Amino acid sequence: MEERFMAIEKEVKRRRTFAIISHPDAGKTTMTEKLLLYGGAIHQAGSVKARKASTHATSDWMEIEKQRGISVTSSVMQFEYNNYCINILDTPGHQDFSEDTYRTLCAADAAVMLIDGAKGVEPQTIKLFKVCRLRHIPIFTFINKMDRASKPPLELIDEIEKVLGIKSYVMNWPIGIHGDFQGVYNRLSRQVELYRKGQDHGAKKAQITVADLNDEQLVATIGENYCSELRQDIELLDEVGEEFEQSRIDQGLLTPLYFGSAITNFGVETFLQSFLELAPSPQPKMSSAGMIEPNSPEFSAFVFKIQANMNPGHRDRIAFMRICSGQFTPNMEVKLQRNGKILRIVQPQQFMAQEHKSVTEAYAGDIIGVFDPGNYRIADTLTEKNRNFTFGDIPVFPAEHFARISPKDSMKRKAFVSGMEQLAQEGAIQIYKEYGIGTETYICGVVGILQLDVLEVRLQNEYNVAINRQLLNYHIAGWVDRSQEAVDLDELNLTSTTMKVLDQDEQPVLLFESNWAQNWALEKNPGLKLLSIREKH
């Protein structure tokens, strides 16, 4: 037993599981691609918005992602580097897909926050940062796109502190910020790392020349002005900059700050090596039975993501699980805590975006994908058969936009219903049936309007179903609480604009155009109580 405990602890300590977050177009998927390149997981990086390159980013596998050059779903990638086992969660940056990002952050032990050097802290970055802060996870900041003109570094540091409310410890310092990027000064090694522009558009590893700050050749290489300015900046940082404190980093109170350029690969390898040393191994997870330690020998995990049709030809459905404790072994039996069922996990997979391989063992921090015939839901907890507890903390968001969705070809109704139900189980959409009407049409609720575009493309590409969609003027959904007394839907006094629908579990829901319409329903129907989607869950 002691040997098994030691073996599990050793494996847990070498794992790093983190999410990459940013505002759209700050270079998040590009950064993911370059970490894979330096980790040896791929040999040539694809371009997310490639003009001169024919490849696409490894983490963008959906057709709509390749067409639009955006990430619309979180990707999971695992690889080995310098005896670390790394799990990267690449998340969508667009606010319309933030629900998927928030869920994914629940599976991460740390976050890498990318900031565009020219734009600074942007609105979506603020929202995602707040989620990380609520979860008290360490945050590592990479100021990206330094190969272009950027804001002054001190201004960016001040902006991070004032807008996000977090202090930063500068790990390296840029040389040249006006589109004349020369490289960075590494504060830990006290060396200058010089940037040399390659001709391969960032497809291969960057070549770095290292020089000493006091080397006479450095003046000849970058010029007297750059040398003088760099020495002044470093002196200022040493005098008034934040002190390095690992404990504050672990608590999410101090962010290590790096400068570089993901598109050209400059600074990526240095960042990766530093991050792996400073970032935490898998952390304890709170459950209904108390804290679950990652080195506990008893297996536990939770489902944070479900993805249908990663291989459209096979109509597959994958449930992504974050392992929280113990060791996973093939064909092991686990208890699904939601209903007490004993399930055998067969052919679990680990991923490099869409590509996957069979898992022979996995430990706390690892993400595994399980082929799912319909057993799992988001936030499900799995444990060993003799245990009874659940993990919580998977956020659910209310829909803000609604549309009536129907198939253009009524002969494809079966495929339409199957597609809508599977995509709803992923958590990408919420679906409702109109009260008293069949399933020829669905009412679809989404957090962001762009999700409707993705729905239409995926139904067409993955289920061969073209749809009609009609936007509706509803913005609020309220679940009818039937726990205390019976409510007769047919007898409710509602405004003419309120719609009665049933959710996937046949629970009654009222859709309102405004707060006024919702207040009318509550005032005119004594005993009516409405729940939000968070309360319903």
Image (cartoon, helix red, strand yellow):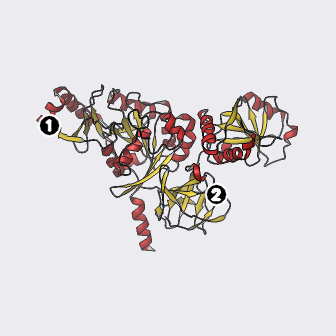
Asked where in the image residue 431 lies, by quadrant, the reply is top right
Q: Residues within 10 Å of mark 2 (few under 14, many from 20)?
A: few
Label 2 element class? loop
Residue 311 shown left or right of residue 295 in the figure: right
Q: Which residue is mark 1?
A: 214
Q: Amino acid at mark 1?
A: Asn
- Percent of width and height locating residue 536: 70, 46
Image height check: is 49 above or below 503? above
Residue lying farthest left? 216
Q: Nearer the viewer, mark 2 or mark 1?
A: 2
Residue 373, label in figure = 2
- Percent of width and height locating residue 69: 48, 35
Q: Amino acid at mark 2?
A: Pro
Label 1 element class? loop
Residue lying farthest bottom? 1
Is residue 288 visible to the viewer in this orientation of the structure?
A: no
